[in-house]
Structure formats: C-alpha cells, structure tokens
Amino acid sequence: MVNESLNTFDTELIRQKNVIQGAPVRGDKPYHRFIQQLAPVASDQVLAAMRRSLRSLPINDNMPLLARIPSNLVQSCRMNLVAPHRNWLFRPRTRVIEYVGDDYLMQPGVPEAIRVIYRALTPAVAQ
C-alpha cells in the first residue's frame, strides 16, 4: 500500500485544528482521530467554503531559490553518490500546488462549524 498525502481540504482542517489548539497535548493522536471521525463531522458548509477559496501556486524546481537545494545537496554528498547521480539527484519539475486560502474562514457559519470539528477531534482534557 502506498502512503498518500491527505487531500487539500483534509490538510487544511488539520492545519486549522492545530492553529486553534496550539501546542499538541502529550500522547494526543489528532491524525488518527481525524481519519476515524472526520467524515461525520466535516460539514458540507465548510468543505464548500474551502472549495470556493481554493488557490493554486505554480512551483518550478528551476526557480533560483529552489535550484540551490539539489546543487547544495550534491556538493555535500558527492563522495557518497554513485553514477549517474554524481552531478544531479532530481530532474527539475514544474507542478501546481493547491491550497485553501484563509478567506474561507470569513464565510457565514464556517467559524462555528470549525469549532464543532475542533471539539470532535480534540480530547476533552485539552478543551
């Protein structure tokens, strides 16, 4: 089985829960609770608001800031690399990253729905 990332909307809900909660509670497993309980808790209203606030950001590995990362890695690890990777590790790619803009939180009813999700995913001790 392949380990897949959460989708954009689930990732945003976990991010928002972490913003509300702050520092994690010792022994807390929010990810597991999220996976088990999200379906009945996440309201259609919140997901619809997120869809309306969906943004995209094109990322190109050849951008100056990102291009330095593989070259610095190759320089520091060159002695441990085998051919054909002595001069490069990654083929540069261009991709589009989707994320949910924070403006979804301003839509009517969303803050209240987020609080319901937070209460469902947060242990009683932390509330």
Image: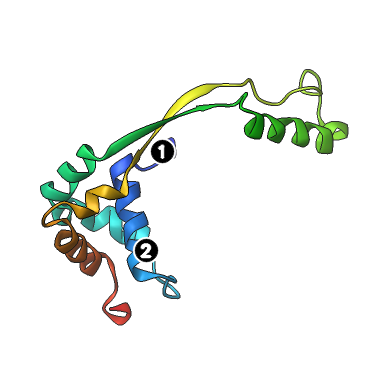
Residue shown at the point (36%, 43%) measured from the top left: 6
- Note whether 14 is above or below 10 in the view shown: below
In-front residue for pair 52/26: 52
- Residue 120 is left or right of residue 29, and the answer is left
Q: Earlier in the sequence, mark 2 or mark 1?
A: 1
Q: Which marked residue is nearer to the observer: mark 2 or mark 1?
A: 2
- Graded by Cα atoms within 10 Å as few (under 14), some (14 to 19) or many (20 or more), the crowding at tag 1 reads few
Residue shown at the point (37%, 55%) measured from the top left: 15
- Note whether 42 is above or below 51 in the view shown: below
Q: Quadrant of residue 96?
A: top left
Q: Which residue is mark 1?
A: 4
Q: Which residue is mark 2?
A: 19
Q: Disc 2 versus disc 1: distance between alpha carbons?
A: 23 Å
In-front residue for pair 30/17: 17
- Graded by Cα atoms within 10 Å as few (under 14), some (14 to 19) or many (20 or more), the crowding at tag 2 reads few
Q: How many numbered marks does the figure carry?
A: 2
- Note whether 86 is above or below 73 in the view shown: above
Amino acid type shown at disc 2: Val
